[in-house]
Each structure stands twice: as C-alpha cells, then as structure tokens.
Image (spheres, rainbow, N blue to C red):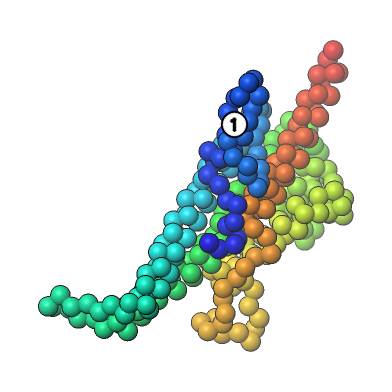
Amino acid sequence: MNPFFDGLEHSSSFAFIIEEGKPIPVKEVQYILFESDFVPFIVFSDELYSINDYCFSVATTIQNERNEAHEEMIIQRREQKSYDDGFLQFTPYEISMSIESRFRSREWISNIMAAHLVVLLYAYLEKTLKYIKKWYVDEKIIEPRQNNSSTPKLFWLIYHILETDEDQFIQSAPHVYNVLEEARKMRNNFAHDNLEGKKLDNTEDYLYAERSFTPTFKLTELFDAVTLTLFYTEEVYKKKAKSSSETHE
C-alpha cells in the first residue's frame, strides 16, 4: 500500500464498547477525528467523519486493484500464459504487457489520489474556518480584522480566529503548522503544475518527468492537523461561553 495512506481507518474503528462500566476503544488507531458536543461543531465533526470514510474507501479500492494487478503480473511472468479462444490470440508477451500497463495505471492513480485527498481535506478545513470566523465576528466573540497581508487564506483565518500571529502559532503548534503548510503547497502544485501535487522545475518535461510523489507527511497526520485546528477554534467558543456564564451569575 502507498505509505501515504498507512494507518488510515474506517470511522467504525473510532467507536467504543462499554466493559464493566468503562469505555474501551474497539481498535487502537494512529490518529484522531474531531468530535464535539456543541452546535454547529457537531456538524463539522460529522462532515470530517464522512470525509475520512470517503478517503478510506477510495484508498482501499485503488490499493486492492493495484495489488491484484501486481499479483497477476507475478503469476504471468512465472507461468507465461497465452490466450487462444479460436477468435482472439495473445502471446505471453502481449498478456504481460497488458497486465503491466494496468499495474502502472493503478500506481499512477494512487499518486494522484494522494494529492486529490489532500486538496479535499484542505478545502474542507478552509471553508469550515471561513464559516467559524464569520460566526465569531457576528457574535462578537472575536474582533473584525482585514487581511491586508500576503498570508495564505487558511492561515489568516486560523490567526484571526485564535487572535494570534504566525510566530505564536508556529511556537505553540509547530507540527500542525508544518503539515498544513506542506498540504497547502501540495494543493497549489495540484492546481497549477500537475495532478501528483509535485513541484516541477522549469527544466523538466511534464510528460517525461518522474512524477511519482511521496509527501513529507501521511494522510493521517493531515487528519490530526485538521482535528487539532478545529479543537483550537472550539476552545475560543468555550472560553467565551464560560466567561458569559460567569458574568451572569
């Protein structure tokens, strides 16, 4: 399996069972998915769970197809089968080339799928933060702020909602920042350079360049970064709600 998808689980793996009055996870997982008891954060959680299952489904499907083609390729190389039904005839070489072509196709799809899923998660987080920012401003939880800098939109939304700046955010959540920044670059490369999300230099021919790409992070790490960012933004709401409650006591 493409190492980018290592550790990815279906949402059912995040469930708990009760044993002797204690919640026990049904499976040990390598990452977390955002959950909340507050509206509209519950909606954001449900959406993230759905995106997780979509990612798991497409990743599992293409990896299974790739593995099947790889197994067929090994068998054909060993047994050198031919095909003749009286109408169509294929030599062992022709069959081998057909299977290897299908295998290479699945390898390439696995690469572009990685970038596609990064773009999906990044877009989800950006649109969610855009909603939260407007909601917080309307409810006077945070002050309005104009984006007059060259800061990427996603990070500007984070800094505005958390009422912080780049240096403070990097210091407090360095891994979250690094993963989101790498995801942003991958998204831009996907949109402007190639479907694999890899930055090509000006000397490389797009058709013949080595375009397979292994990101510096795993998809599970991006889920973690998205989840933690949502937790951070929810804490702003909780603090405001607690402050309002104490004021009215």
Residue 43 is at least partly visible in this image: no
Q: Where is residue 72 in the image (x, y as percent from the top left)?
A: 37, 69
Q: Name the residue under label 1.
A: 16
Secondary structure category for the residue under label 1? strand
Count of all numbered marks drawn on residues in the image: 1
Q: Furthest residue to the left? A: 86
- In-image side of 41 versus 162 (left or right): left
Taking depth in this image into account, of 145 and 115 the one nearest to the observer is 115
Q: How crowded is mark 1: few (under 14 residues within 10 Å), some or many (20 or more)?
A: few
Q: Is 60 above or below relative to 22? A: below
| Residue 166 x %, y % | 83, 54
Question: 55 above or below 67?
Answer: above
Q: Kindly identify the amino acid type of the residue bearing the numbered disc 1.
A: Phe
Is 178 on the left-hand or right-hand side of 187?
right
Which quadrant would residue 138 be assigned to in this image? top right
Seen at 48% across and 54% down, the residue is 60
> In the rendered view, does 51 fall on the left or right side of 184?
left
Tell me where residue 164 appears, x and y as whole percent: 85, 46
Q: Residue furthest bottom?
A: 203
Residue ID at (47%, 50%): 57
In percent of width and height, residue 156 lies at 76, 52
Residue at horizontal 55%, vertical 63%?
A: 2
Classify 90 as above or below 151. below
- The image quarter in which residue 145 lies: top right
Residue 14 visible in rendering:
yes
Q: Quadrant of the C terminus?
A: top right
Residue ID at (65%, 47%): 30
